[in-house]
Amino acid sequence: MADKMYSGLTFEEAVQKYASCVRSACVMRLGSEHDADDCFQNTFLKLYTAAPDFNEEEHLKAWLLRVAINECRQLIRYNRRTVPLDSVGHLTLPPTEDARDISWAILRLEPKYREVLYLYYAEGYSTEEIARILNKNHSTVRTMMRRGREKLKTIYGGDENE
């Protein structure tokens, strides 16, 4: 299994190439770097143990993102009975000096909105591709993006004249 190739990449090369996007997707979904690390590790463990065949690198990336999102969902379901710290008190990151950095506002969105906005803006997927990755209807993804943008404007305090 050590010589298994994933779209022409070794396991180590696949981890190195896609670590950033998988970890970012997990952080955006969970809002916690510690939980994201767990899901990140589980995602690449599944790649190693399942050793699926991919025709293209884009299929590998989409598979990794889908597994990562499913791992996050599973962790959320498992931890449903716990109370997150940010619900105890209003703990949010303050805006940075860079007005273009809206990551603090995105982290305040519900996970379903963070997920689609991250895949669209950060990873560059189309709404059709996001629908396939998340196993949702295309119109559902477009609605989630619209609602997520509206909520983001409210959180970020966007100017409607821009």
Image (cartoon, grey):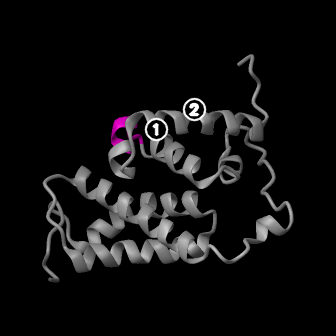
Quadrant of the image for the C terminus? top right
Q: Answer left or right for 15 relative to 70.
A: left
- Which element is circle 2 on? helix
Q: Is residue 125 magenta?
A: yes
On the image, the x and y values in percent for residue 142 come to: 48, 33
Q: Secondary structure at mark 1?
A: helix
Residue 91 position within the rendered picture, expressed as x and y whole percent measured from the top left: 82, 62
Indicate which disc residue 107 carries: none
Residue 126 appears in the picture as rendered: no
Q: Is residue 33 left or right of residue 40?
A: right
Picture layout, residue 29 above or below residue 16: above
User: Who's the residue at 28% across and 66% down the image?
Assistant: 14
Say whether residue 81 is magenta.
Answer: no
Q: Which residues are magenta?
A: 124-130
- The foreground one among 133 and 81 is 81
Which-is-in-front pick, marks 1 and 2?
A: 1
| Residue 73 in view of the camera | yes
Q: Which residue is identified by label 1?
A: 140
- Mark 2 sits on what residue? 146
> Is residue 2 placed above or below 80 in the rendered structure?
below
Q: Amino acid at mark 1?
A: Thr
